Amino acid sequence: MFLHRPVAKKEQWKRWQARRNLALCRAEAHGRLPREMADRLKLTEAHIKAKIKEGKRVEEVGVDTAAREAGAEEDAT
């Protein structure tokens, strides 16, 4: 029971990141420039471009699968 909350919170965070990356990917598909998104989100353009690439992966496999894969990669390191 004590371990459930931190584990669930970590999985929830991974799903949120996957949804965010998907949103960035779709914004780019609708004509938003990475430079514009970076300025609005106070992030670097390189960071946004990397997240757009991850968003394309999320589009292919789905949010839950992408979150599980990210969690598995984190556990492997």
Image (cartoon, rainbow, N blue to C red):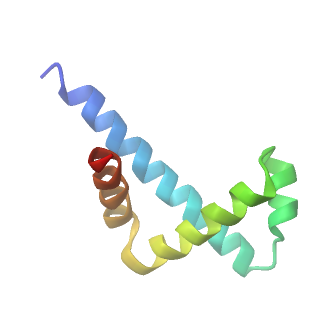
Q: Is residue 44 left or right of residue 39?
A: left
Residue 35 % position (x, y): 86, 62
At a point 81% along the width and 79% down the height, the residue shown is 31
Q: Is residue 46 left or right of residue 17?
A: right
Work out which residue is located at the far left of the displayed protein and give it: 1
Decide: is 6 above or below 41.
above
At a point 54% along the width and 76% down the height, the residue shown is 56
Residue 59 % position (x, y): 48, 76
Residue 18 % position (x, y): 48, 58
Decide: is 26 above or below 17.
below
Total label count? 0
At a point 41% along the width and 48% down the height, the residue shown is 14
Quadrant of the image for the N terminus? top left
Q: Is residue 34 left or right of residue 64?
A: right
Task: Give the image quarter of residue 33.
Answer: bottom right
Residue 72 % position (x, y): 28, 54
Work out which residue is located at the far front of the displayed protein and give it: 77
Task: Give the image quarter of residue 8.
Answer: top left
